[in-house]
Amino acid sequence: MSSLDPSGCKKRKRVERVFKFKAFGEQGYPIESCGTFRDNVKALLEYGNVEMAFVNGMTFWSFQLEVHRHPPSHILLFVVEESAEASSLNRHCKHCIYVGWGDHMICNKKYHFLVPSKDTMAAFLSYEENHSSIVMGKLNFVELNGHTMHGVFHSNGFGHLLCVNGLEMGSDLAGHHILEFWSRLCDCLQARKVSLIDLAKQKSMDLRLLHGVAYGQSWFGQWGYQFGRGSFGVTQQMYQKALEALQNIPLCILAHHIGTSNMEIPILFSRYQTLSSRSLVTLADLLRFMLDLKSHLPKESVLHTHNPGILVENSCRWSPKRIEMAARVIVESLKKAKFRWVSRQEVRDAARAYVGDTGLLDFVLKSLGNHVVGKYLVRRCLNPVTKVLEYCLEDISNTLPNQEELVTSDSKLKARYKISRAQLMNDMFYIYRHVLKGQKKDMDSTITSTISLAARIVLDSKYFVKDYNGEIRSKVESEAGEKSKLYCTIAIQDTGEIDGHKEGEKKLITTPYETIMLRNNATFDEVIEEVVKNFKEIYWGLKSFVFGSIINLNPKGSDQVFRVTKTGSKLVFQGKLVETGSNHESIYESGPRQRFIVDCGCGAKDDDGERMVACDICEVWQHTRCLKIPNNEETPNIYVCSRCEQDILVLPALP
């Protein structure tokens, strides 16, 4: 694996602590996770190297992470603190809006966690060398597409995983390693909730559909991400029903309806039923088996017990029996090397003691690369240093699932070895295209409409959320009995047309609860001061907050808190904002919401990130897809919705 080692840059020649990538974020490495999210971030950043401070309201830290020791391989993790007050970027978070957190208040700070790719890392270093461009370079570095990983947290502990680019996108890290690293970070920092947009694909197949049918959850579901919000009015119940409908489709029904016009599908079903030791009854059974098999097959192009292309050639002067005997001699020679890489000449010399025909040995050695002999895979590669061909054995007896059952069935064992990873992917893509994305010519209209509708619902469900144990995740406990904790929130009265409330009505808006540690003899005056200070540090919109009262409590300021309420209680501190001349609705992530009305025929009432167009009369937004405006067409310069058209038609004619 190539390294993104920054030591080549003169500005970076300094002593840096190196952390292990596979352990970074575990408890105690580098920090003990305790306190609130903000406390944990501050503790983590103490271990980072400050790259640049106060650039466009941002401060940069870096951590050097060792991926492999031999050969040496490192990556860099950058943490960027972005201030809402000083940053020139848009304060409103579109990711919060799309996932349904638009009613959250804007936080004072965001923390970007970035693992740059080779390209974005090169851009970062080049900007460092050119100091005159550093301000624009730092700004672009955060917004740049193509990072290996980019996640962002608001200072209240809510976050978004913005991108994961694994091996298929040119990264040196596999996607599952990146997700495991991100999950450790979230646990370490005690994140509250984290969202992502699942657009993951493999060979143009949407993984949220493929894995959804196979396992009942998206690929990200392995790390606890569940349905968060659907586009085009899709609800969680619709999503679950669609998955169940697709999963439970019997293969026999598909084969019956498709087989008359597409014989390839029944053949594929039969092929993988032969390979499986269990009965494949439904579409979920088939796709789950194929995906499990794919995860165990080597990445080499083909697995064969021998090379049939050579054996059937009439020009071949050696019989299949002699070739098989020579192959087994070579394997026995490699077994003596105890699975280390051996040069071609060493293998040839060891095998000559049993096979005198050097021409036969050369022929078999040339043909044996990445082939299976018995329970061993013979690997072959060119040594990049010596430029000499080398061979190595890999025991694959435990690689494939249900190996004990397969050994008892020689025909199944040989059949499975004849399935290459590439062929399996092609078969999977064929099923994906002709079944999940079925063409009408392949099925009758009933099957087509059912699968098409269910698949579209699953594909319209791409916002997933992981809830880290609800709102309160603080592990802070009392310190020698001297301190106790409360869970506190701020509530303010808001006005305007929000969530169906008519303009002028008041709605109580609360923030997520925060953990507040207090002395056991603390008074209410002290807790009010501590709560107001903490929430002003977190939320940009609460800088003018003035405390009014505690809901359901009416204590005196000198009263001791824990004589009135128990430790661990939830308290709501109500107050108001002192207006500063601007519309205070701009303190929310969604901005001035009453000016943006969504009312689409699909049922959507909020901005879900999909393409929309607004009526020029009523100014209500609707999806272009629901209005049957193709994505490759521009939206009309003047658009009037059907409701306004009807109103115009019933207007009396002008005299």
Image (tube, helix red, strand yellow):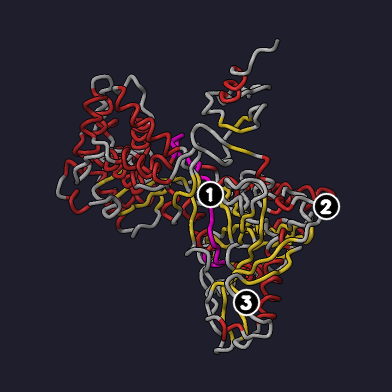
Relative vertical location of residue 414 with respect to residue 350 in this rendering, above or below:
above
Disc 2 to disc 1, how far (Cα)? Answer: 35 Å
Residue for badge 1: 196
Residue for badge 3: 554
Q: Nearer the viewer, residue 293 or 89?
A: 89
| Residue 458 covered by magenta stretch | no
Q: Nearer the viewer, mark 2 or mark 1?
A: 1
Disc 1 to disc 3, how far (Cα)? Answer: 42 Å
Residue 431 visible in image: yes
The magenta region covers: 187-206
Image coordinates of residue 218 in percent, x first then y, are 42, 47
The quadrant in which residue 494 appears is bottom right
Image coordinates of residue 320 in percent, x first then y, are 21, 35
Label 2–label 3 contact, CB within 8 A: no
Question: Outermost residue, left direction?
Answer: 408
Q: Nearer the viewer, residue 319 or 63?
A: 63
Residue 131: mark in rendering: 2
- Residue under the point 59% across and 41% down: 607
Residue 358 visible in image: no
- Residue under the point 54% across and 25% down: 627
Image coordinates of residue 153 in percent, x first then y, are 61, 58
- Residue under the point 25% across and 44% down: 326
Q: Earlier in the sequence, mark 1 or mark 3?
A: 1
Residue type, label 3? Asn
Image coordinates of residue 541 in percent, x first then y, are 72, 58
Relative vertical location of residue 557 with respect to residue 396 in this rendering, above or below:
below
